[in-house]
Amino acid sequence: MEADQLISNIGTRVRRLREAQGLSLRQVAQRAGLSTSAVQKTEAGAMTPTIGVLMKIARGLKCRVTDFLEEDGQRGEVVLTPRRQRRRVTWGRGRITVETMAGEPTIPEIVVFELDLAGGADSGHDLLSHRGEEIALCVKGKIRFEIEGKPFDLRPGDCLHFKSHLAHRWSNPGPKPARMLLVCTAAANRSLPWQ
C-alpha cells in the first residue's frame, strides 16, 4: 500500500471510530490534548500524523494506535484468528505469557486471553479494580483469585465470573505452571496490566 493511501486509511478509521462513539472533533481533540484542526486534518488525510499525534488520538478515542493501521477486511463483525497470528506478550519479569485468543472487531465488546503462569506468578501486589466484567477459566494447574479479600481456588475446568469493580488479584499459588483463559469486557481490557 502506498504512503498516501495509508494516510487516507488512517484518517478514515479515526473518523469511523469517532463517529461510532458519537464524539465531535472538538471532544476528541480535548480528550487527546490536541487542536481540533489537527484531528480534522488527520481525518481528512491533509497531514501526515506523527506517532505521537496518533497516540494522543488513540487515547482520546480509548483505543490502540494499531486500530488505525489494520488493513481493510482485517476487522469486522466476524474475525478468524489463526493460532500462529495470535499476539503474545511476556509480562511480570517473564513469568507470565499472555496470548490474545480472539480477533479484535473494530470496537470490541469482549476480548479473550490465554495466560501461562509460572509457579508463584501473580497479577501484582496492587489490587485491580475497574469497570466491566471478567470470566476466568482454569485450564491447567491451580489459579487463586482474591476478590474483596475472599479467596477463590480454581482447578482445571473451574470458572469464575465477577464484576471487575470489585477489588481483585490473581495468582498461581503452586510451584508448577498453570494456565487460564481470561474473558474480559472492553472496559476491563483497557485496564489490564499488560495492555
Image: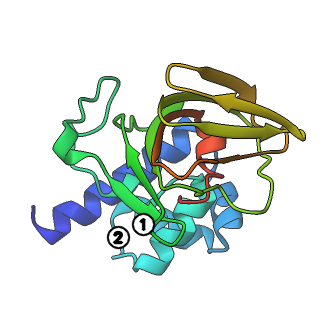
Amino acid type shown at disc 1: Thr
Which x, y percent locates residue 177? Answer: 45, 48
Residue occupying the far left of the picture: 1
Q: Is residue 73 left or right of residue 136?
A: left
Residue 94 makes an appearance in the image:
yes
| Proximity of marks 2 and 1: CB atoms separated by less than 8 Å | yes
Say which element carries label 1.
helix
> Dividing the picture into quarters, in which one does residue 5 lie?
bottom left
- Mark 1 burial class by Cα count in 10 Å: few <14, some 14-19, many 20+: many
Q: Which of 111/144 is in front?
A: 144
Q: Is residue 22 visible?
A: no
Three-letter code, disc 2: Ala
Q: Residue at x 76, y 63 (%)?
A: 125
Q: Nearer the viewer, residue 136 or 95?
A: 95
Asked whether, in this view, residue 170 is left or right of residue 125, the answer is left
- Residue 83 image point, x, y percent: 21, 39
> Which residue is under mark 2?
46
Q: Is residue 80 above or below residue 11?
A: above
| Cα distance in 3D space between marks 2 and 1 | 6 Å
The residue located at (64%, 45%) in the rendering is: 23
Instruction: State the residue in front, 107 or 184.
Output: 184
Q: Which residue is mark 1?
A: 42
Residue found farthest to the front: 175
